Image (cartoon, helix red, strand yellow):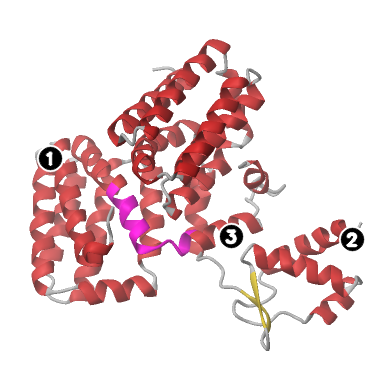
Amino acid sequence: MATSTSRSAIATASGKPAMSAEIHTLLQRISGTSPVDVMAVRLMVEPHAAAQAAASATSAELEAIRNCHDRAAAEADPNEFEKRDAEFHAQIFLATRNELLVSLHDILRVIRNQPSWVEIKRRSASDARRRAYCEEHDQIVRALLDHDPDAAAQAMRAHLLTVNQNLFGGTGLV
Amino acid sequence: MPARKTSTVAEELRKRIAAGEWQANAAMPNERDLATGFGVARNTIRGALAALEEEGLISRQVGRGTIVKQQPSDELKLILDKFAGASPLDILNLRLIIEPQVAASAAINASARDLAAIDEADAEASRNEDVAAYDQWDNSFHALIYRATHNDFLIDFWNLLAIVRYREPMQVIRHRGFTLARRNAYCIQHRQIRDALHGRNSTAAHDAMKLHLAARRRNYFGD
């Protein structure tokens, strides 16, 4: 079933991976993943990443995460907040030191940076919601600083459920 | 003979699109010019373009001709390279994070038709003691569980992993770690996953998949 995909991924003689039409199509489809599907995957992956980060983050990594959180909280401009917010989540993935998990999150980030997403986020943004996100980020940071994996996973899950609710209301059931 | 010619032309066109010969959203030469260029009949070109359209590389619109579709971003290509270069252990560890949750999601999202397909893959895997045939059905079993989530990203994530899973080193590892006793244990584990899916029990599906993949990791790479 998957063998045809694999055959096309075989490296060329130069050692550079060949970009076959099948992989091309795969990437194209991934770029077009629906917002609801992306949020479902974030809910699967990010609580785990937070737990892993709580267990394995160095003090420098924790400092970087806290820094992102502080800067997001201090940001008045919605677009800038959005960037800091994304960076906060990315730093947590980095702290897992699981390269593939980081790559998986990078894929989700590329999808979320597409124009259709920007519009959804803009429509759902408000000052009150931003403040709520910052409080939830604060809970996550506390759990990470306590090196408490269960609390970190739980805080991340609660946060993503809020985001999911704000983005899709009752329509984005996961 | 014509089918063969069609696939040769299609492959050549794929290469030229990947090489950037035609800009995204710009028109390709028309069928007649392509036919002249390749020295083949227009029917052959038409067949090749139909294949490319099927793959999502091009779109054909009345009045606009054949348009090369937007290429996926370079960023995504770079990320994909990381997956293609990942170690077998890293891949299995990533599956250990994702796949139990995939099974949990499949338990509540699978249709009766999904479950029937999973049952069939499970039954075929149980029937095959030969490593290559078993491997094939085992692969289908897992692929169908991803499919049963009805989450397009997860389905494509499996396709992404398949690129790595079917590279030679990974296949060597799977075949080296294959014994009849282990295969029998996998069959029992698959049955537990299957039962949990049928019972619509997300927690049980999650735990059964986790146990199964952990057993595989032990068998391939030790503790």
The numbered disc on residue A151 is: 1
Q: Chain of mark 1?
A: A
Q: Which residue is mark 3?
A: A25
| Residue B114 located left or right of residue B106 | right
Label 1 is placed on what type of residue? Answer: Ala
Residue B206, quarter of the rendered image: top left
- Residue at image position (48%, 59%) is A30
Q: Closer to the N terminus: mark 1 or mark 3?
A: 3
Label 3 is placed on what type of residue? Answer: Thr
Foreground tag (1 vs 2)? 2
Q: Is residue A124 above or below residue B182?
A: below
Using the rendered image of the protein, determine whether residue A9 is visible from the camera's viewpoint.
yes
| Residue B218 located left or right of residue B121 | left
In the image shown, does A166 or B106 lie closer to the viewer? B106
| Residue B38 located left or right of residue A55 | right
- Residue at image position (68%, 82%) is B27
- Residue at image position (43%, 35%) is B90
Q: Position of residue A69 (x, y in %)?
A: 14, 58
Q: Position of residue B130 (x, y in %)?
A: 66, 19
Label 2 is placed on what type of residue? Answer: Pro
Count the marks.
3
The C terminus of chain B lies in quadrant? top left
In the image shown, does A9 or B66 lie closer to the viewer? B66
Q: Which residues are magenta?
A: A30-43
Mark 1 nearby-residue class (10 Å; few <14, some 14–19, many ≥20): many
